[in-house]
Amino acid sequence: MGVQLKRRGSRWRIQDSLAELGELAVSARAQVIGSTFQRIEKPTNIYVGKGKLEALNELAQAGRFDTLICDDELTPTQQHNLENALGDVKVIDRTALILDVFASRAQTKEGRLQVELAQHEYLLPRLAGQWSHLERLGGGIGTRGPGETQIETDRRLVRDRIQRLKRSLEDVRRHRRLHRARRNANQMPVASLVGYTNAGKSTLLNTLTRAGVRAEDRLFSTLDPITRRIMLPSGTRALVSDTVGFIHKLPPTVVAAFRATLEEIEESTVILQVVDVSHRNAKEHVRVVEDILKEMRLVDIPRILVLNKVDLLPDDSDPVEIAEEISSGYPGPYVLMSATTGLGGLGLLNTVDETLADIANRVPASTV
């Protein structure tokens, strides 16, 4: 279920956003039986308007579905009101769904720590709804109700767990900083792969480095950063680092929790922004990643746009024309390639070589 505000322009068609939500749901092993949306003037405290709510309730009462997934992050009030209105139907939002997919993908201790931190920070403001049935059972001075007492206890436990997770992740960050310091001492350039989820970053890493990383045609097939060495055509040794994929409406709690992983990008010499050139929303995918890089203040790092999956373009299409359209306004060169077939791989390595040479030849402003 999605909503689109009539007066707010969006780069995304609501249908495309819901289609992506459906892919996420399938990744979480849900069976998607349908989708619907509503255009409304302004947000409501039930997420949807009364007419759409009645239609959903009729379907729910008929047993057509048992879970409603909303395409936005719901406020605790919206989720509470929706659940009350729909009876036994489970209501979750886009953030909860993404966190569920992340939890199923995290393989390393670091990945699991990051996901758990995001889950707890998402849960904290929603604890009251878990105990609404116990509220106001007691009252007066010295006789706080058991609901309030349980909420206070749960909040304290969650806050304590959040602090422990943050301390553990700070240890991870210190460990990573030591690794990066050693790399910097060896003056080995780092190329970080960033991009929209399922753009083919892991496949590209395998193609360039023979890393043997699991690469699957599904959203967020890997969350854990992987770094491998590579030899460029010029003879320069470099490191290539894969990172977590981005997505439309990526929750701030997720970006914050994955700070330790995303800091790898901060130390990049060059960023390889991977895009599925065959996707109908390829240009929007570029913008989503660009927006997140801006939020992370990483736009000053040289970037190369890797237009991947060129082998999936229709035979009657013009790859160069499509590439020019997608890369219009991009602050760096683009390379057309297929990570699956290896087509364009040498061209990408040469472009990385040229970019690194250009960086090395720059004269520091302080010496001018």
Image (spheres, rainbow, N blue to C red):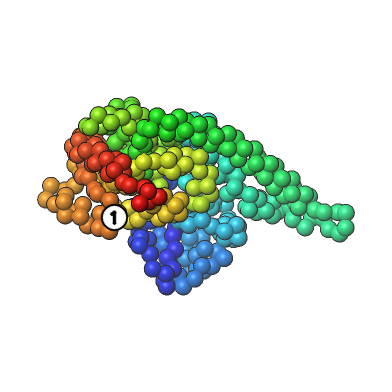
The 10 Å Cα crowd at callout 1, few under 14, some 14 to 19, many 20 or more, is: some
Q: Residue at x 41, y 62 (%)?
A: 37
Q: Quadrant of the N terminus?
A: bottom left
Left/right placement of residue 337 relative to residue 269 reads left
Left/right placement of residue 93 relative to residue 142 reads left
Q: Residue at x 33, y 32 (%)?
A: 238
> Compared to 359, does 2 lie above or below?
below
Left/right placement of residue 68 relative to residue 311 reads right
Q: Nearer the viewer, residue 224 or 186?
A: 186
Figure label count:
1
The percent position of residue 19, horizontal first and vertical second, equals: 36, 53
> Compared to 123, does 208 lie above or below?
above
Residue 70 visible in image: yes
Extreme residue toward the right, this view: 142
The percent position of residue 105, horizontal first and vertical second, equals: 45, 36
Identity of the amino acid at label 1? Tyr
Residue 215 visible in image: no
The percent position of residue 127, horizontal first and vertical second, equals: 65, 50
The percent position of residue 21, horizontal first and vertical second, equals: 41, 51
- Element type where label 1 sits in the image: loop
Left/right placement of residue 337 relative to residue 137 reads left
> Compared to 75, does 116 lie above or below?
above
Q: Which residue is mark 1?
A: 330
Q: Residue at x 67, y 45 (%)?
A: 159
Extreme residue toward the front, this view: 368
